[in-house]
Amino acid sequence: MERLASALSDRYEIEQEIRSGMATVYLAHDVRLELDRRRVAIKALHSQFSSAHATERFLREVRVAAKLVHPNIVTLIEYDQVDNEPYYVMPYVDGGTLRDLLKDHHQFPINEAVRIATDVLSALEYAHSRGIVHRDIKPENILFSADKPMVADFGIARAITEAKQAAEEGITDGARIGTPAYMSPEQCAGQPADGRSDIYSLGCVLYEMLTGKVPFAEANPQSTMLRHISDPVPPISTVRPAVPLGLERAVLKALAKTPADRHASAREFAEELHKRLSLPDGVAPASVAVLPFENLSGEQGTDYFSDGITEEIINTLGQVTGLHVAAATSSFAFRGKAVSLEDVGEKLRVATVLRGSVRRAGSHLRVTVQLSNVANGYVMWSQRYDQEVREATDVFAVQDEIAKAVSGRLRVSFGDASFELPATPPTKNLEAYTLFLNGRSLWGQRGLGLNKALALFGQAVALDPNYAAAHAGFADCCILLAEYGALPPGAVLPKARAAIQRALELAPDLPEAHCASGELSLAFDWNWQRARTDLRRAIELSPRYSTAHYRLALYLSLVAGDYTEGLTHARQAVELDPLAPLPQAQLGVVLMAAERYEEAIAALQRATELPPAMLAPYLYLGGILNHVGRTPEAIECLINAAAASGRHPSSLTQLAGCYRALGDTAKVQAIYDELTARARGGGEYIQKTTLAVAAGAAGRIDEAFQLLDRAFEEHDSILLFSKRHPAFFPLQADPRMADLYRRIGFPSEPNHSSLGSNS
């Protein structure tokens, strides 16, 4: 100290020694600045580096590091040597070190730990971009100035390494370069280290701030380094469960054994920390997805009951003001899959997930549930319900109790949310409720399940004539069976009208009843005002009812020509139910109507990838692909659809249009002959519009319009698409088509301008 003080007396006055290790640190002040007496820290290295060659190499490396100027880096003021012993000077940072804070705080607040790490990463990103790696990131080298972390000793580890290589005698193990508790595996193994080594070291520091201890610590430094090389990092959650799961994953990625498996840069690590600590954009804190409850009853074919309880809890939670609830269809996409909470949260855009199981034995019902936080995987609440169920009201009581507990827990955690139990249960008949649940499960699958669903809804109504939801379900099944061409409209629509009327008499504010009424008015009655009013009323009653949104979108695009609002509702339906195929398919239809064909193709391809498999997306997709000139793709798509659907007439009609585009008249004629034979000789009901399009493709234009006239008389629902679907374009040049549109009541001009194909 005396020798150094004498050599530097013209510049600095040394006050005291403040720390000793590989270098001795002295507190001093700059005598050249008498007014503010700037305080500095002088680090003098020990005599291991006393050879001239070693000192020269040390100073050469420090010279590079001295060029670093960054708000989170302690800059080097000067550097030199005294009797071949190097020293360097830096500003004295009086806020202490991170090591000092760790002694006072066993575990840091999560936000504070991330803030410190992010500031250090900013310094690392700056230095790494200039080719400088720190190589000794540890709490002792992170200083604080007015709560701002600053990294000290940049480049010193490299300088010491260079000096060591030049020294005549090696450094003892006690003075090993780097600090074993924070050294990367490659450092421990004596391999070259780049910026990803600093990321590993900072990962150790952040791990320590979160848990209160480093990942690996042994009494023997060699043992510690060996663990860095070979041992898995203990999970943070085992020590501190409150740390968000995503944040833990970001830290553990930084601590990967292989550099290539870590964050590629300090910037990437910082971005990952920020993303994992906060909710993704657009995710409401008060949001929940209810995954399908596991059926533990042990009886085959009873999943509908556990599914029904799941859906009813979803519906009840949907009544909570301010609570975002994922749609049932999208939640059910995770049925039977081993998925992480993070995956569910990301795909359904929710902050919490409710999972559970149902065990039913005779009249005894056991429901077990748990609510988990997506960010950290922490179980926020769990409960088991045991109840004897004699009536459906007993089941509803359990469902409502669960929903009330979940909403209350979310209200405590995330803010305001009001909750009121339904005024009256939908039915008191347990058997009717069970039939309704089974019917709704089949209704959601569409296809062949609709006939069974219709029968089950009918049985539920027979057991409880005042069951409004069952009446609405019965009506919707009738409408869909007619739309899909499974039954003639005249055979089922009168039943649908009566069921809708009865449902609205029993429950005037039942969204499903208004939605069914709007669909009936839109697809078959062509009563545009009633369709618009009913569908908007359904959305008003249940803003998160995706079916009402996409049905209103079809009215706006196919009839009103308002593609702007139509796309708004279609996209909202997809946002509300992102993993369901129908909203995606109807978005494709709206884009098709707006002549945005490439976007429509993308939406429809997405719909074909989502379970359950449905015919409609393939039909729309095939028609549009053919229209844009991608006919071979269209044929492949439609051949597969025809095979999977038992040669559904609509798939064959679309194929006929493709073969017509290729000039393959023989195949067009073969399809026309098959469909007419099935309709006449086989007694199969085939929608007249389907036959008309096939006749048009075969060049039988007069016959096509005769069939369209009959379709008009039968109120064939496919006529709703006749102005916008490419399958009808070959007929639109004929003036008889304009007359048909006039009779249907289509507006002569769109109410709003089209967005156009390039919008």
Image (spheres, rainbow, N blue to C red):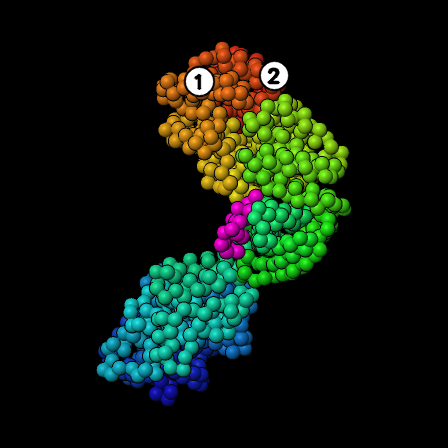
User: Which residue is found at the position 61% from the left and 59% from the top?
Assistant: 370
* Percent coordinates x, y for residue 322 in the rendering: 66, 49
Q: Is residue 331 above or below residue 656?
A: below
Q: Is residue 694 above or below residue 339?
A: above
Could you say which is closer to the camera, residue 120 or residue 402? 402
* Percent coordinates x, y for residue 347 in the rendering: 51, 49
Mark identifier at residue 673 = 1
User: Which residue is found at the position 53% from the left and 41% from the top?
Assistant: 580
Kindly tell me whether residue 506 is visible in this rendering: yes
User: Circle 1: is it few (<14), some (14-19), or many (20+) Cα within 10 Å?
Assistant: some
Q: Is residue 241 above or below residue 735?
A: below
- Asked whether, in this view, residue 80 is left or right of residue 307, the answer is left
Q: Identity of the amino acid at label 2?
A: Glu
The mark closer to the camera, 2 or 1, is 1
- In the rendered image, the residue lying farthest to the bottom is 2
* Percent coordinates x, y for residue 399 in the rendering: 68, 52
Where does label 2 land, which residue? Answer: 713
Q: Quadrant of residue 25?
A: bottom left
The span shown in magenta is 329-348
User: Which residue is found at the position 50% from the left and 56% from the top?
Assistant: 340
